[in-house]
Amino acid sequence: MPVHPRKLEKLNKRLQNVLKQANIESHRAVIQRISANLNIDLIDCAAALLYISQPHLIQNAIPQEPQKPIAVTPVNNRNVRYRLDVGCQHNIDPEQLLAVIIEESGVDRNRITRLEIRDNYTLVDLPDGMPADIFQLLSEAYIGEYKLNIKRVKPNRRKLKN
């Protein structure tokens, strides 16, 4: 079960924070109800939920047989612009930055568009509809000693006057 150590460490920290700070009794009851309804073990239920929330946490070491491609029309192929708090002055390498974004978010490299590294920040377009937990991971991610601190850039909605 190859898990990237940094991802596992971040997951451990997030779980510790939740267990210390949040009241999860209602969540426990829901998990027990789901487990009973599906007639599955609590560990299997937790593993399935982890897979849903962190599908790229575990790298499959055993290559699986290729499946027949399924023709699916993407529901939403739009991208959204984000701002990262790292730029040229931080001596970052574009490939290294892309690697961090891909590793933390699990976004396909082909879906990351328009990477513009400016003096003290970077603009990048990522797929619309990024889950909150992935956004949180990217927000807390570092490249070297610099935190990405990702923020969504609001589109300029000014109407042009004729």
Image (tube, rainbow, N blue to C red):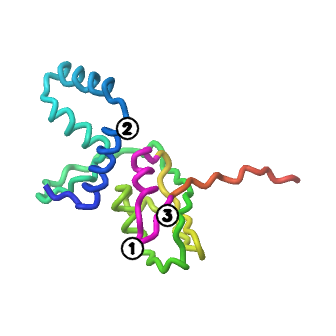
Q: Nearer the viewer, residue 74 or 155?
A: 155
Of badges 2 and 1, the one in the foreground is: 2
Residue lying at the far right of the rendered structure: 162
Q: Quadrant of residue 143?
A: bottom left
**Residues packed near mark 2 inside 10 Å, few (<14), some (14 to 19) or many (20 plus):** few
Residue in the picture at 23% in, 61% down? 5
Of badges 3 and 2, the one in the foreground is: 2
Q: Position of residue 65 (x, y in %)?
A: 13, 54
Quick one: label 2 or label 1, which is nearer the N terminus?
Answer: 2
- What numbered label is drawn on residue 113? 3
- Specify the quadrant that holds the N terminus: bottom left
What's the CA distance linking mark 3 and mark 1? 15 Å
Q: Position of residue 110 (x, y in %)?
A: 41, 62
**Residue 133 magenta-drawn?**
yes
What's the CA distance linking mark 2 and mark 1? 34 Å
Q: Is residue 119 above or below residue 46?
A: below
